[in-house]
Structures are given as C-alpha cells and as structure tokens.
Amino acid sequence: MRQFFLSALLLVVPVAAIPAIDLSDFDDDVMRAMDDAYKDLEPVLGASNADAARVDLAVLKEGYQWTHEYFTGKKAEAPDALEIVIAGRKLLGEIQSALDARDFTLGVTKARELHANCKSCHDTYKPKKQ
C-alpha cells in the first residue's frame, strides 16, 4: 500500500524539468563580478553609502546587459531566462532611482528583490555541482 501511495504521489507532484541548454559559453567571470557586487550592495545601501552603491550598481548593470545579450541569443532555449533578466534590469533602475532620491530603505528593499530575481535564474539554469 505504501509503495502504491508513493508511486501515485510521484505522478501527481510535478517535477521541475532540467532545461536542455548549453551554458558552456557563459562567462563565469561576469557572474562572479555580479555576485561580489550584489553581496556588497545591500550592506552599503543599509549604511547609506551612495558612492559604494553606485560602484556596485555599475557592475550589476554591466553584468545584466551582458546576460541580456547572452540570453537573447538563446531565447528559443531559455525564454524565461530572458524574462528574468528583463525584470532584473527593471529592478536595477528602481534601485538607481531610490539611490538618486537617497531613499536607502527602498534601495535595500529593491536589492532584496534583485536577489530573488538572481536566485530564480540560478535555480533554473545554474549547473549543479557534481
């Protein structure tokens, strides 16, 4: 009976499909730079350090631009990745606007949303360590 239940459960619970996309040409250095900038962004916004936040935003904007171009070329294989990148670029603009208004609280909130945006793409596309 238990075995039947587990088999039935597997039929009902959707399993996330692993995308069939070749990411071997993805620039890992871009991701590392973005990761470093993101890890720094929220704390410097929290500390109201506008100059450091601008440096981090510049790195992130450049990285999202590269990623946008990359996934535009792979749109047929990863259409949702392109949507994630576009949403992330919008968030970067919102962080920039908050920074320009010196609204560091909003900047931190938007930086957290940006983290969720990054994570959503990584959850789907970042190759799992073997």
Image (tube, rainbow, N blue to C red):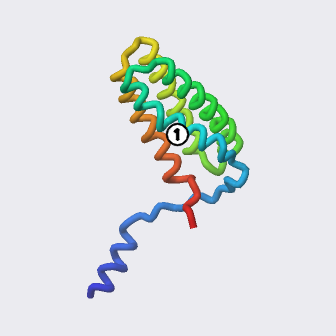
Q: Residue furthest bottom?
A: 1
Residue nearer the viewer, 44 or 105:
44
Q: Residue at x 47, y 40 (%)?
A: 117
Q: Residue at x 57, y 37 (%)?
A: 34
**Is residue 88 positioned above or below 78 on the image?**
above
Q: Residue at x 32, y 86 (%)?
A: 3
Q: Which residue is mark 1?
A: 84
What x and y, as percent, mark residue 60? 57, 31
Position of 28 compared to 107: left or right?
right
Q: Residue furthest left?
A: 1
Dot 1 lies on which element? Answer: helix
What x and y, as percent, mark residue 56? 54, 28
Which quadrant would the N terminus be assigned to in this image?
bottom left
What x and y, as percent, mark residue 47? 37, 24
Residue nearer the viewer, 32 or 3:
32
Number of marks present in the image shown = 1
What x and y, as percent, mark residue 84? 52, 39
Disc 1 marks which amino acid? Answer: Ile
Q: Residue at x 51, y 33 (%)?
A: 88
Which quadrant would the C terminus be assigned to in this image?
bottom right
**Is residue 32 positioned above or below 89 on the image?**
below
Position of 77 compared to 51: left or right?
right
Task: Give neighbour class at mark 1: few <14, some 14-19, many 20+ (Cα, 10 Å).
Answer: some
Residue nearer the viewer, 86 or 110:
110
**Is residue 40 positioned above or below 18 on the image?**
above
